[in-house]
Amino acid sequence: MENNKSQCVKFYSGQEIPLELHKVRIVQKLNLIPIEERLKAIVEGGFNTFLLTTKTVFLDMLTDSGTNAMSDNQVSSMLRADDAYAGSQSYMRLEEAIMETFNCKYFLPVHQGRAAENIISQTFIKQGDVVPMNYHFTTTKAHIEINGGTIFEIYTDEALKVKSSHPFKGNLDIGKLKDIIKRYGADKVAYIRLEASTNLIGGQPFSIANMREVRKVATEHGIMIVLDASLIGENAYFIKQREAEFKNKSIKEVLHEMLSLVDVTYFSSRKVSSTRGGGICTNNEEIHKKMRDLVPLYEGFYTYGGMSIREVEAMAIGLIETLDESVISQSPSFIKYMVNELDKLGVPVVTPAGGLGVHIDAGQFLSHVPQKEYPAGALAAAYFLISGVRGMERGTISSVRDANGNDVLADVELLRLAMPRRVFTLSQVMYATDRLNWLYRNRELVGGLKFYEEPPVLRFFGGKLEPTSPWPAKLVAKFRADFGDSL
Ligand code: F0G
């Protein structure tokens, strides 16, 4: 059920506390193991939080991808799945949900977001093309480059400032867009890509005013706009909160306005609707037909696209639930709470609070660790060690090497602490904040990392590293001195 009212509940005490507008009915036991065992786990995992097993993790803040909590309605919908290779009624329900959520006529289902990127890149990118965008995502960049394209990140000057009060740090710089079109010619621009709640720069949204300006330039030059809508619900929520024109609009109205300004929209439903899967939407039949044949080739038949039919059902319900402000606001309000607490404690955190998670500025947090020793990776490992909270490195380890084998240093070194929707309680968030505060007070004990096993592509997933000095043991000793026998 759509809900247009503001979800902000005011407390008599005046405190800003994010109130859970759901109840917890199924729970999963967590393990909080002693720090000595966590030390063993992080050593075995090559100081890479991707390589930890969940048995050793207390709060899993690695990602919100596929980890948001499902609703009772989603879980129960899975039981009525109409299992059929072709023409399933579950798929018909998904198409209806896509129409309602995104106001979009043509839809192609895929097994996850990067599968959509594969189809879009193969269809629209030719060798030597350029793709301007507000910021890249790892898998997006890899797909564009593998098809012969080059990306240009044309964010505004505000985007990479850690401390800021700019409401739309995800905006695209229109002046830089015009320059690229002039420099390369419109026919070399495969498309302009806009990423909602820009993942790698701290979950920061763009405004509809900015989208309209991009649309104007794109139409002038006959260029297509592709929207990565993996975090679109959160971006729509921020537009409602921060862009005066949309204050009294529903999330659905904001989404429809956003989708009306682009030519192609794709998403990872692992994020949008708390299920697996993904999809590509358009209202342009010609564009749809160009991509359509790749679905049975790479994904599966047109009416399941590599997803199980159960997931198709749950995705349909999840998309409709995205329109409910009490659902879509849950993660941003918890993020805002943790960001504000950390900010008060002086811990360097990206502001204003965005979507997806809390982003710590590891460059500043560990200013004594040189960037070539991966401060964001070191911080992720150290934080897991002292708390059992698993975050994700989003810095130079997530980058690549140049032709000479040197690291391409990331624009920002971030530790991302994802806040999957409706998964954590407030006391767990308080624990995560408390341990991070302790680590900040003891930051000089943390040192750098170096690779001893490094995959050539997307190295952050499987790469293994080791400390450049015996800093982990020192951290364990200080933890024991301060916390006694506490877990
Ligand atoms: N685009 C964005 C903006 C994403 O955040 C992701 C995934 C993808 C595309 C790819 O989607 O994983 O379903 O293939 N982000 C996850 C994350 C992995 O942890 O931020 P996918």
Image (cartoon, helix red, strand yellow):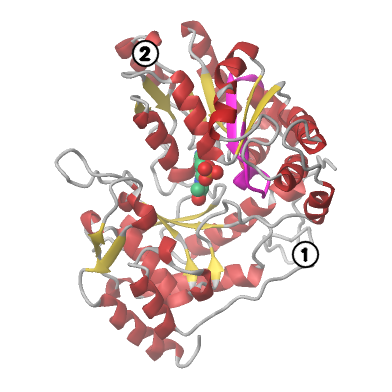
- Residue 375 lies in quadrant: bottom left
First-in-chain label (1 vs 2): 1
Q: Which residues are magenta?
A: 260-279
- For the residue marked with disc 2, what is the amino acid? Lys
Figure quadrant of residue 232: top right
Tag 1–tag 2 contact (CB < 8 Å)? no
Q: Magenta segment: does it hold 261? A: yes
Q: Secondary structure at mark 1?
A: loop
Asked if disc 2 is less than 8 Å from ligand 1, the answer is: no
Along the line of sight, the residue nearer the viewer: 291 or 42: 291
Image location (x, y in percent) of residue 17: 68, 62
Magenta-colored stretch includes residue 255:
no
The residue beneath circle 1 is: 12
The quarter of the picture where residue 383 lies is: bottom left
What percent of the width, then of the height, locates residue 484? 45, 92
Residue 204 visible, this angle: no
Tag 2 residue: 188
Residue at 71% across, 29% down: 102
Name the secondary structure under disc 2: helix
Query: Three-letter amino acid code at disc 1?
Result: Tyr
- Camera-near label (1 vs 2) is 2
Residue that extends furthest to the left in the rendered view of this protein: 404
Say above or below: 394 vs 3: below
Q: Residue furthest bottom?
A: 485
Relative to 29, 183 lies left or right: left
Residue 471 pos. (x, y %): 26, 76
Q: Is residue 359 above or below residue 94?
A: below
Q: Marks 1 and 2, Cα distance to the nearest angstrom? A: 58 Å
Residue 260 appears anywhere in the view: yes
Q: Is residue 417 left or right of residue 141?
A: right
| Residue at 35% in and 30% down | 145
